Structures are given as C-alpha cells and as structure tokens.
Amino acid sequence: MQCTQVRRGMLAKAKGRGKALAACGVLLLALDSGLALAQQDTAYRETQLGLYLSAAEAYELLQNDTNAVLIDVRDPVEVKFTGFAESTDIHVPWSLADRDNFDEQARTWPMVRNADFEAQVAARLAALGVGKDDPIIVMCRSGATRSAPGADVIHAMGYSEVYSVSDGFEGSTLKEGDSQGVRAVNGWRNSGLPWSYEIDPEIAWQP
C-alpha cells in the first residue's frame, strides 16, 4: 500500500518490489495473529515486546522524535469527562461501555471489545504514514487493562516499537486520606503534562 500523506514532513523510503511482496506476506500473518489477540476477552499489563514508558517519558519521546505517535485507547465517555492528552495523534477505543446490558452484580455497565479496533488503528496509522519501525505509544486510563493488549495487537500488525504507558492518563489512586480512591497519583494528567477537555475533531474517534 502506497501512502499518499507524508507525516510531519518525513518522506517514506521507497522499498524494492521483492521486499514489498515479502512484507505483505508477513503482514497477512501478523494480521491473523492480531485478530486473535483482539478477540481475547482478557485484560493484562505486560506486553509481548516488554516496552513501557511512564507518561512523563512518553511525552519526552514525543517531543524528541517527530515520528513517534500517541494512541489513546479509552472509551470516548472517559475522554469526555476526564480529558485528553494534547499530544494524542490517534484515538481508537480498545473497548466500549455496553449501555444496553447493565450488570446488576457488578453494579455498572460492562465493557465490550471494539471489534473494529485493529482495522481502525491500521487505517489511522496508514493515513499518518507511520513506518513499521516508528515509535508507537499506547495509553489507557492507568496502564492496567487496555494499553497492553492494544499494544500487542499493533505489534502483531508488524510494528516493532510499541510502548504501553505504565501509569496511563489518569494514573493511580490515593491509598489514604479524604480523597482515598481518587486517581491523583502520576499518570499524564497528574504529571503537569499538556491536556484538555477539548478534542481535535480530526483526532476524535468517529466510527
């Protein structure tokens, strides 16, 4: 696939026809693996690549490497009420709240996997002209359930440098005091990094 957009002024290097054919074969296998991962209803913190960044480290990488991209994989409702990192390049939710099936035992709405996650992320990465070796940073709320499986799926698509933000956007909860349980420790929002409640329409998830 030939990219028609050049991201951030960087020209994609032309590759030989033989290498392109080989890459296509590898990509097809990777897509199959990524689909299998996307269909798994599991949440975990450790990625297959073992690449992690704190929110502060992620911001530093984004500032120093113009090829690096930040992907927010949170539900749009989370973004609406808790904010959005201004450095975000792509917003595609890993899972979405199921408003039609309230879980009485859990006393909340369950989260269901976004079945189109892989295809939507692939389309956005291609539109930005992101290279297979460019740094990709995946961030969820706290780095505990969604950024890791999301990163694994993106890695399975053929991208070699995919990070999970270990403290996420909101960070960890306070363990004591009047505000116990509030997410006010580390994370993008609590680290003095640029964020806003306003979302760029070009970046916001619009299925």
Image (spheres, rainbow, N blue to C red):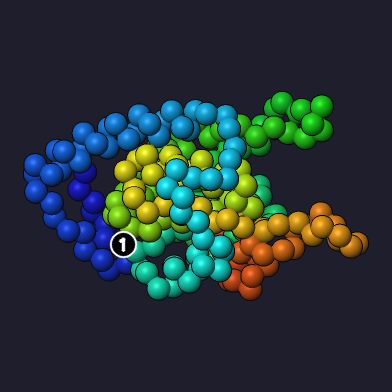
Residue at x-position 57% and y-position 29% = 41
Q: Residues within 10 Å of mark 1 (few under 14, many from 20)?
A: some
Residue 121 image offset from top left, x and y in percent: 42, 44
Is residue 44 positioned above or below 52 on the image? above
Viewport quadrant of the N terminus: top left
Kindly state the secondary structure of the residue where label 1 is placed. helix
Looking at the picture, how far across and down is residue 3, in whole percent? 24, 51
Q: Is residue 25 left or right of residue 82?
A: left
Residue 74, position as x, y percentages in the image: 59, 48
Q: Which residue is outermost to the left?
A: 17
**Residue 183 showing in the rendered view:** yes
The answer to whether residue 50 is left or right of residue 196 is left
Above-or-below relation of 73 to 169: above
Q: Residue furthest right?
A: 178
Horizontal placement of 89 versus 192: left or right? Answer: left
Residue occupying the point 62% across, 47% down: 144
Q: Quadrant of residue 48?
A: top left
Q: Position of residue 127 (x, y in %)?
A: 33, 51
**60, above or below 32, in the image:** below
Tally of marks? 1
User: What's under tag 1, amino acid-wise?
Assistant: Arg
Residue at image position (36%, 68%) is 66
The residue pinned by badge 1 equals 7
Q: Is residue 201 visible?
A: no
Residue sitting at x 46%, y 32%: 37
